[in-house]
Image (spheres, rainbow, N blue to C red):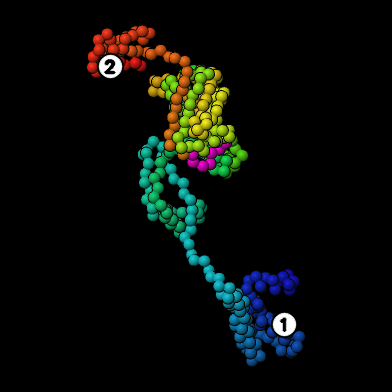
């Protein structure tokens, strides 16, 4: 080892000189052989010269020890001048995974401060005691649904589980025919086993992933939407902003047919700026909700909606061909719906007629 390497090692260890009393005595012995060969430095049977040499070695060792403390003191004073202090001690932390034996109990409460023992496998010694930092209820439940949101693009990105929108909102891929609307997400048979599988790798906050988001207003009615090639009026009281967005193409109307959702063929904003006139060319498909057939009109946002849209109400009306009444009666007698005298031949007070 050269002198530069030795000096670098001493500096890294915080020492100016690492010689001991034995090193100094050895140096005295080697110098004596050169300068006074007639005198022998003997540690076992020392004469007066050897005694003085050993005392000198001990005193020099003490001086070297005090000099070696200078670097650490200089460092401490330098750090104090900068106003830097040692960080306060903090307890060690760790993560613990807890589980239950299968088919034993549904769950167990683990209270804050519960003591846990940690040790190193294969080594004997004192175990480290940890305490839980918060209350925890341990179960064998698994995560079935995971999704991620991306506010800038208004996206909802599914990561785990089965997410399915109502058929009416899915568009042409929905099955034809009458169907019952169901809540989402809706678990399918055998899905529980699939959902217990681990998450597949994914990139957190990746806005490039496909989302399942859909911003739409679904308007159901039993008969007002059943007209074809006649006007349907949708009025938004005190909501001229949404009508303007319909005019600009940000929001578009669709209606549900046996081919799926189709755009309303004719859309026109009325002069009052609050009413939209619609005309569609095909018949609506009926959707069964609680055993009642409904027609569906959809107001769909073509771009992600990042701010709240406030409505104080929606008024719906339609015009069309004459539709015969289903029944006419006066509370006691059913009349012919094609030709009837609603109040009879005799004038009387409080006579009533019901048309439906």
Residues packed near mark 1 inside 10 Å, few (<14), some (14 to 19) or many (20 plus)? few
Q: Nearer the viewer, residue 79 or 121?
A: 79
Q: Residue at x 48, y 53 (%)?
A: 94
Secondary structure predominantly adopted by residues drawn in magenta: loop
| The quarter of the displayed image where residue 288 is located | top left
Q: Residue at x 66, y 78 (%)?
A: 17
User: Which quadrant of the figure contains the N terminus?
Assistant: bottom right
Q: Is residue 165 left or right of residue 28?
A: left
Q: Which residue is the extreme one toward the right?
A: 34
Query: Would residue 223 be seen by someone viewing this image from the given angle?
Result: yes
Residue 276, labelled with which disc? none
Q: Nearer the viewer, residue 1 or 138?
A: 138
SS label for mark 1: helix
- Magenta-colored stretch includes residue 151: no
- Magenta-colored stretch includes residue 308: yes
SS label for mark 2: loop
Residue 352, labelled with which disc? 2
Q: Which residues are magenta?
A: 303-309
The location of residue 356, given as percent across then percent down, is 35, 16
As displayed, is residue 137 above or below residue 165? Answer: below
The location of residue 165, given as percent across then percent down, is 50, 30
What's the distance in space between the residues labelled 2 and 1, CA to CA?
A: 138 Å
Q: Residue at x 44, y 22 (%)?
A: 224
| The quarter of the displayed image where residue 52 is located | bottom right
As displayed, is residue 82 above or below residue 209? Answer: below
> Residue at label 1?
30
Q: Residue at x 51, y 53 (%)?
A: 122
The location of residue 316, given as percent across then percent down, is 44, 27
The location of residue 256, given as percent across then percent down, is 51, 23
Q: Which residue is the extreme one toward the front?
A: 347
| The quarter of the displayed image where residue 60 is located | bottom right
């Amino acid at each position: 080892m050269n002198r530069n390497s030795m000096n670098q090692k001493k500096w890294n260890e915080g020492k100016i000189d690492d010689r001991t009393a034995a090193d100094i005595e050895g140096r005295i012995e080697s110098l004596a052989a050169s300068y006074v060969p007639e005198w022998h430095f003997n540690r076992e049977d020392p004469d007066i010269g050897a005694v003085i040499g050993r005392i000198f070695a001990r005193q020099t060792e003490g001086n070297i020890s005090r000099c070696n403390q200078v670097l650490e003191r200089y460092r401490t004073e330098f750090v104090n001048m900068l106003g830097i202090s040692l960080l306060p001690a903090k307890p060690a932390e760790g993560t613990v995974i807890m589980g239950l034996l299968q088919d034993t109990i549904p769950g167990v409460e683990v209270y804050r401060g519960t003591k846990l023992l940690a040790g190193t496998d294969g080594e004997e010694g004192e175990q480290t005691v940890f305490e839980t930092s918060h209350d925890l209820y341990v179960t064998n439940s698994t995560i079935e649904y995971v999704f991620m949101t991306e506010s800038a693009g208004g996206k909802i990105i599914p990561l785990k589980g089965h997410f399915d929108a109502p058929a009416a909102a899915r568009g042409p891929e929905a099955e034809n025919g009458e169907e019952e609307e169901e809540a989402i997400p809706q678990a399918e048979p055998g899905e529980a086993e699939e959902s217990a599988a681990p998450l597949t790798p994914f990139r957190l906050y990746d806005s490039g992933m496909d989302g399942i988001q859909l911003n739409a207003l679904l308007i159901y009615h039993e008969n007002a939407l059943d007209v074809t090639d006649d006007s349907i009026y949708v009025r938004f009281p005190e909501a001229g902003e949404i009508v303007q967005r319909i005019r600009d193409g940000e929001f578009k109307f669709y209606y549900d047919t046996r081919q799926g959702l189709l755009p309303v063929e004719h859309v026109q904003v009325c002069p009052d700026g609050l009413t939209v006139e619609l005309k569609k060319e095909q018949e609506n498909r009926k959707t069964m909700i609680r055993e009642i057939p409904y027609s569906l009109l959809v107001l769909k946002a073509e771009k992600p909606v990042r701010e709240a849209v406030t409505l104080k109400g929606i008024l719906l009306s339609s015009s069309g061909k004459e539709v015969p009444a289903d029944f006419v009666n006066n509370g006691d007698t059913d009349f012919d719906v094609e030709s009837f005298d609603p109040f009879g031949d005799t004038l009387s007070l409080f006579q009533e007629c019901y048309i439906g």
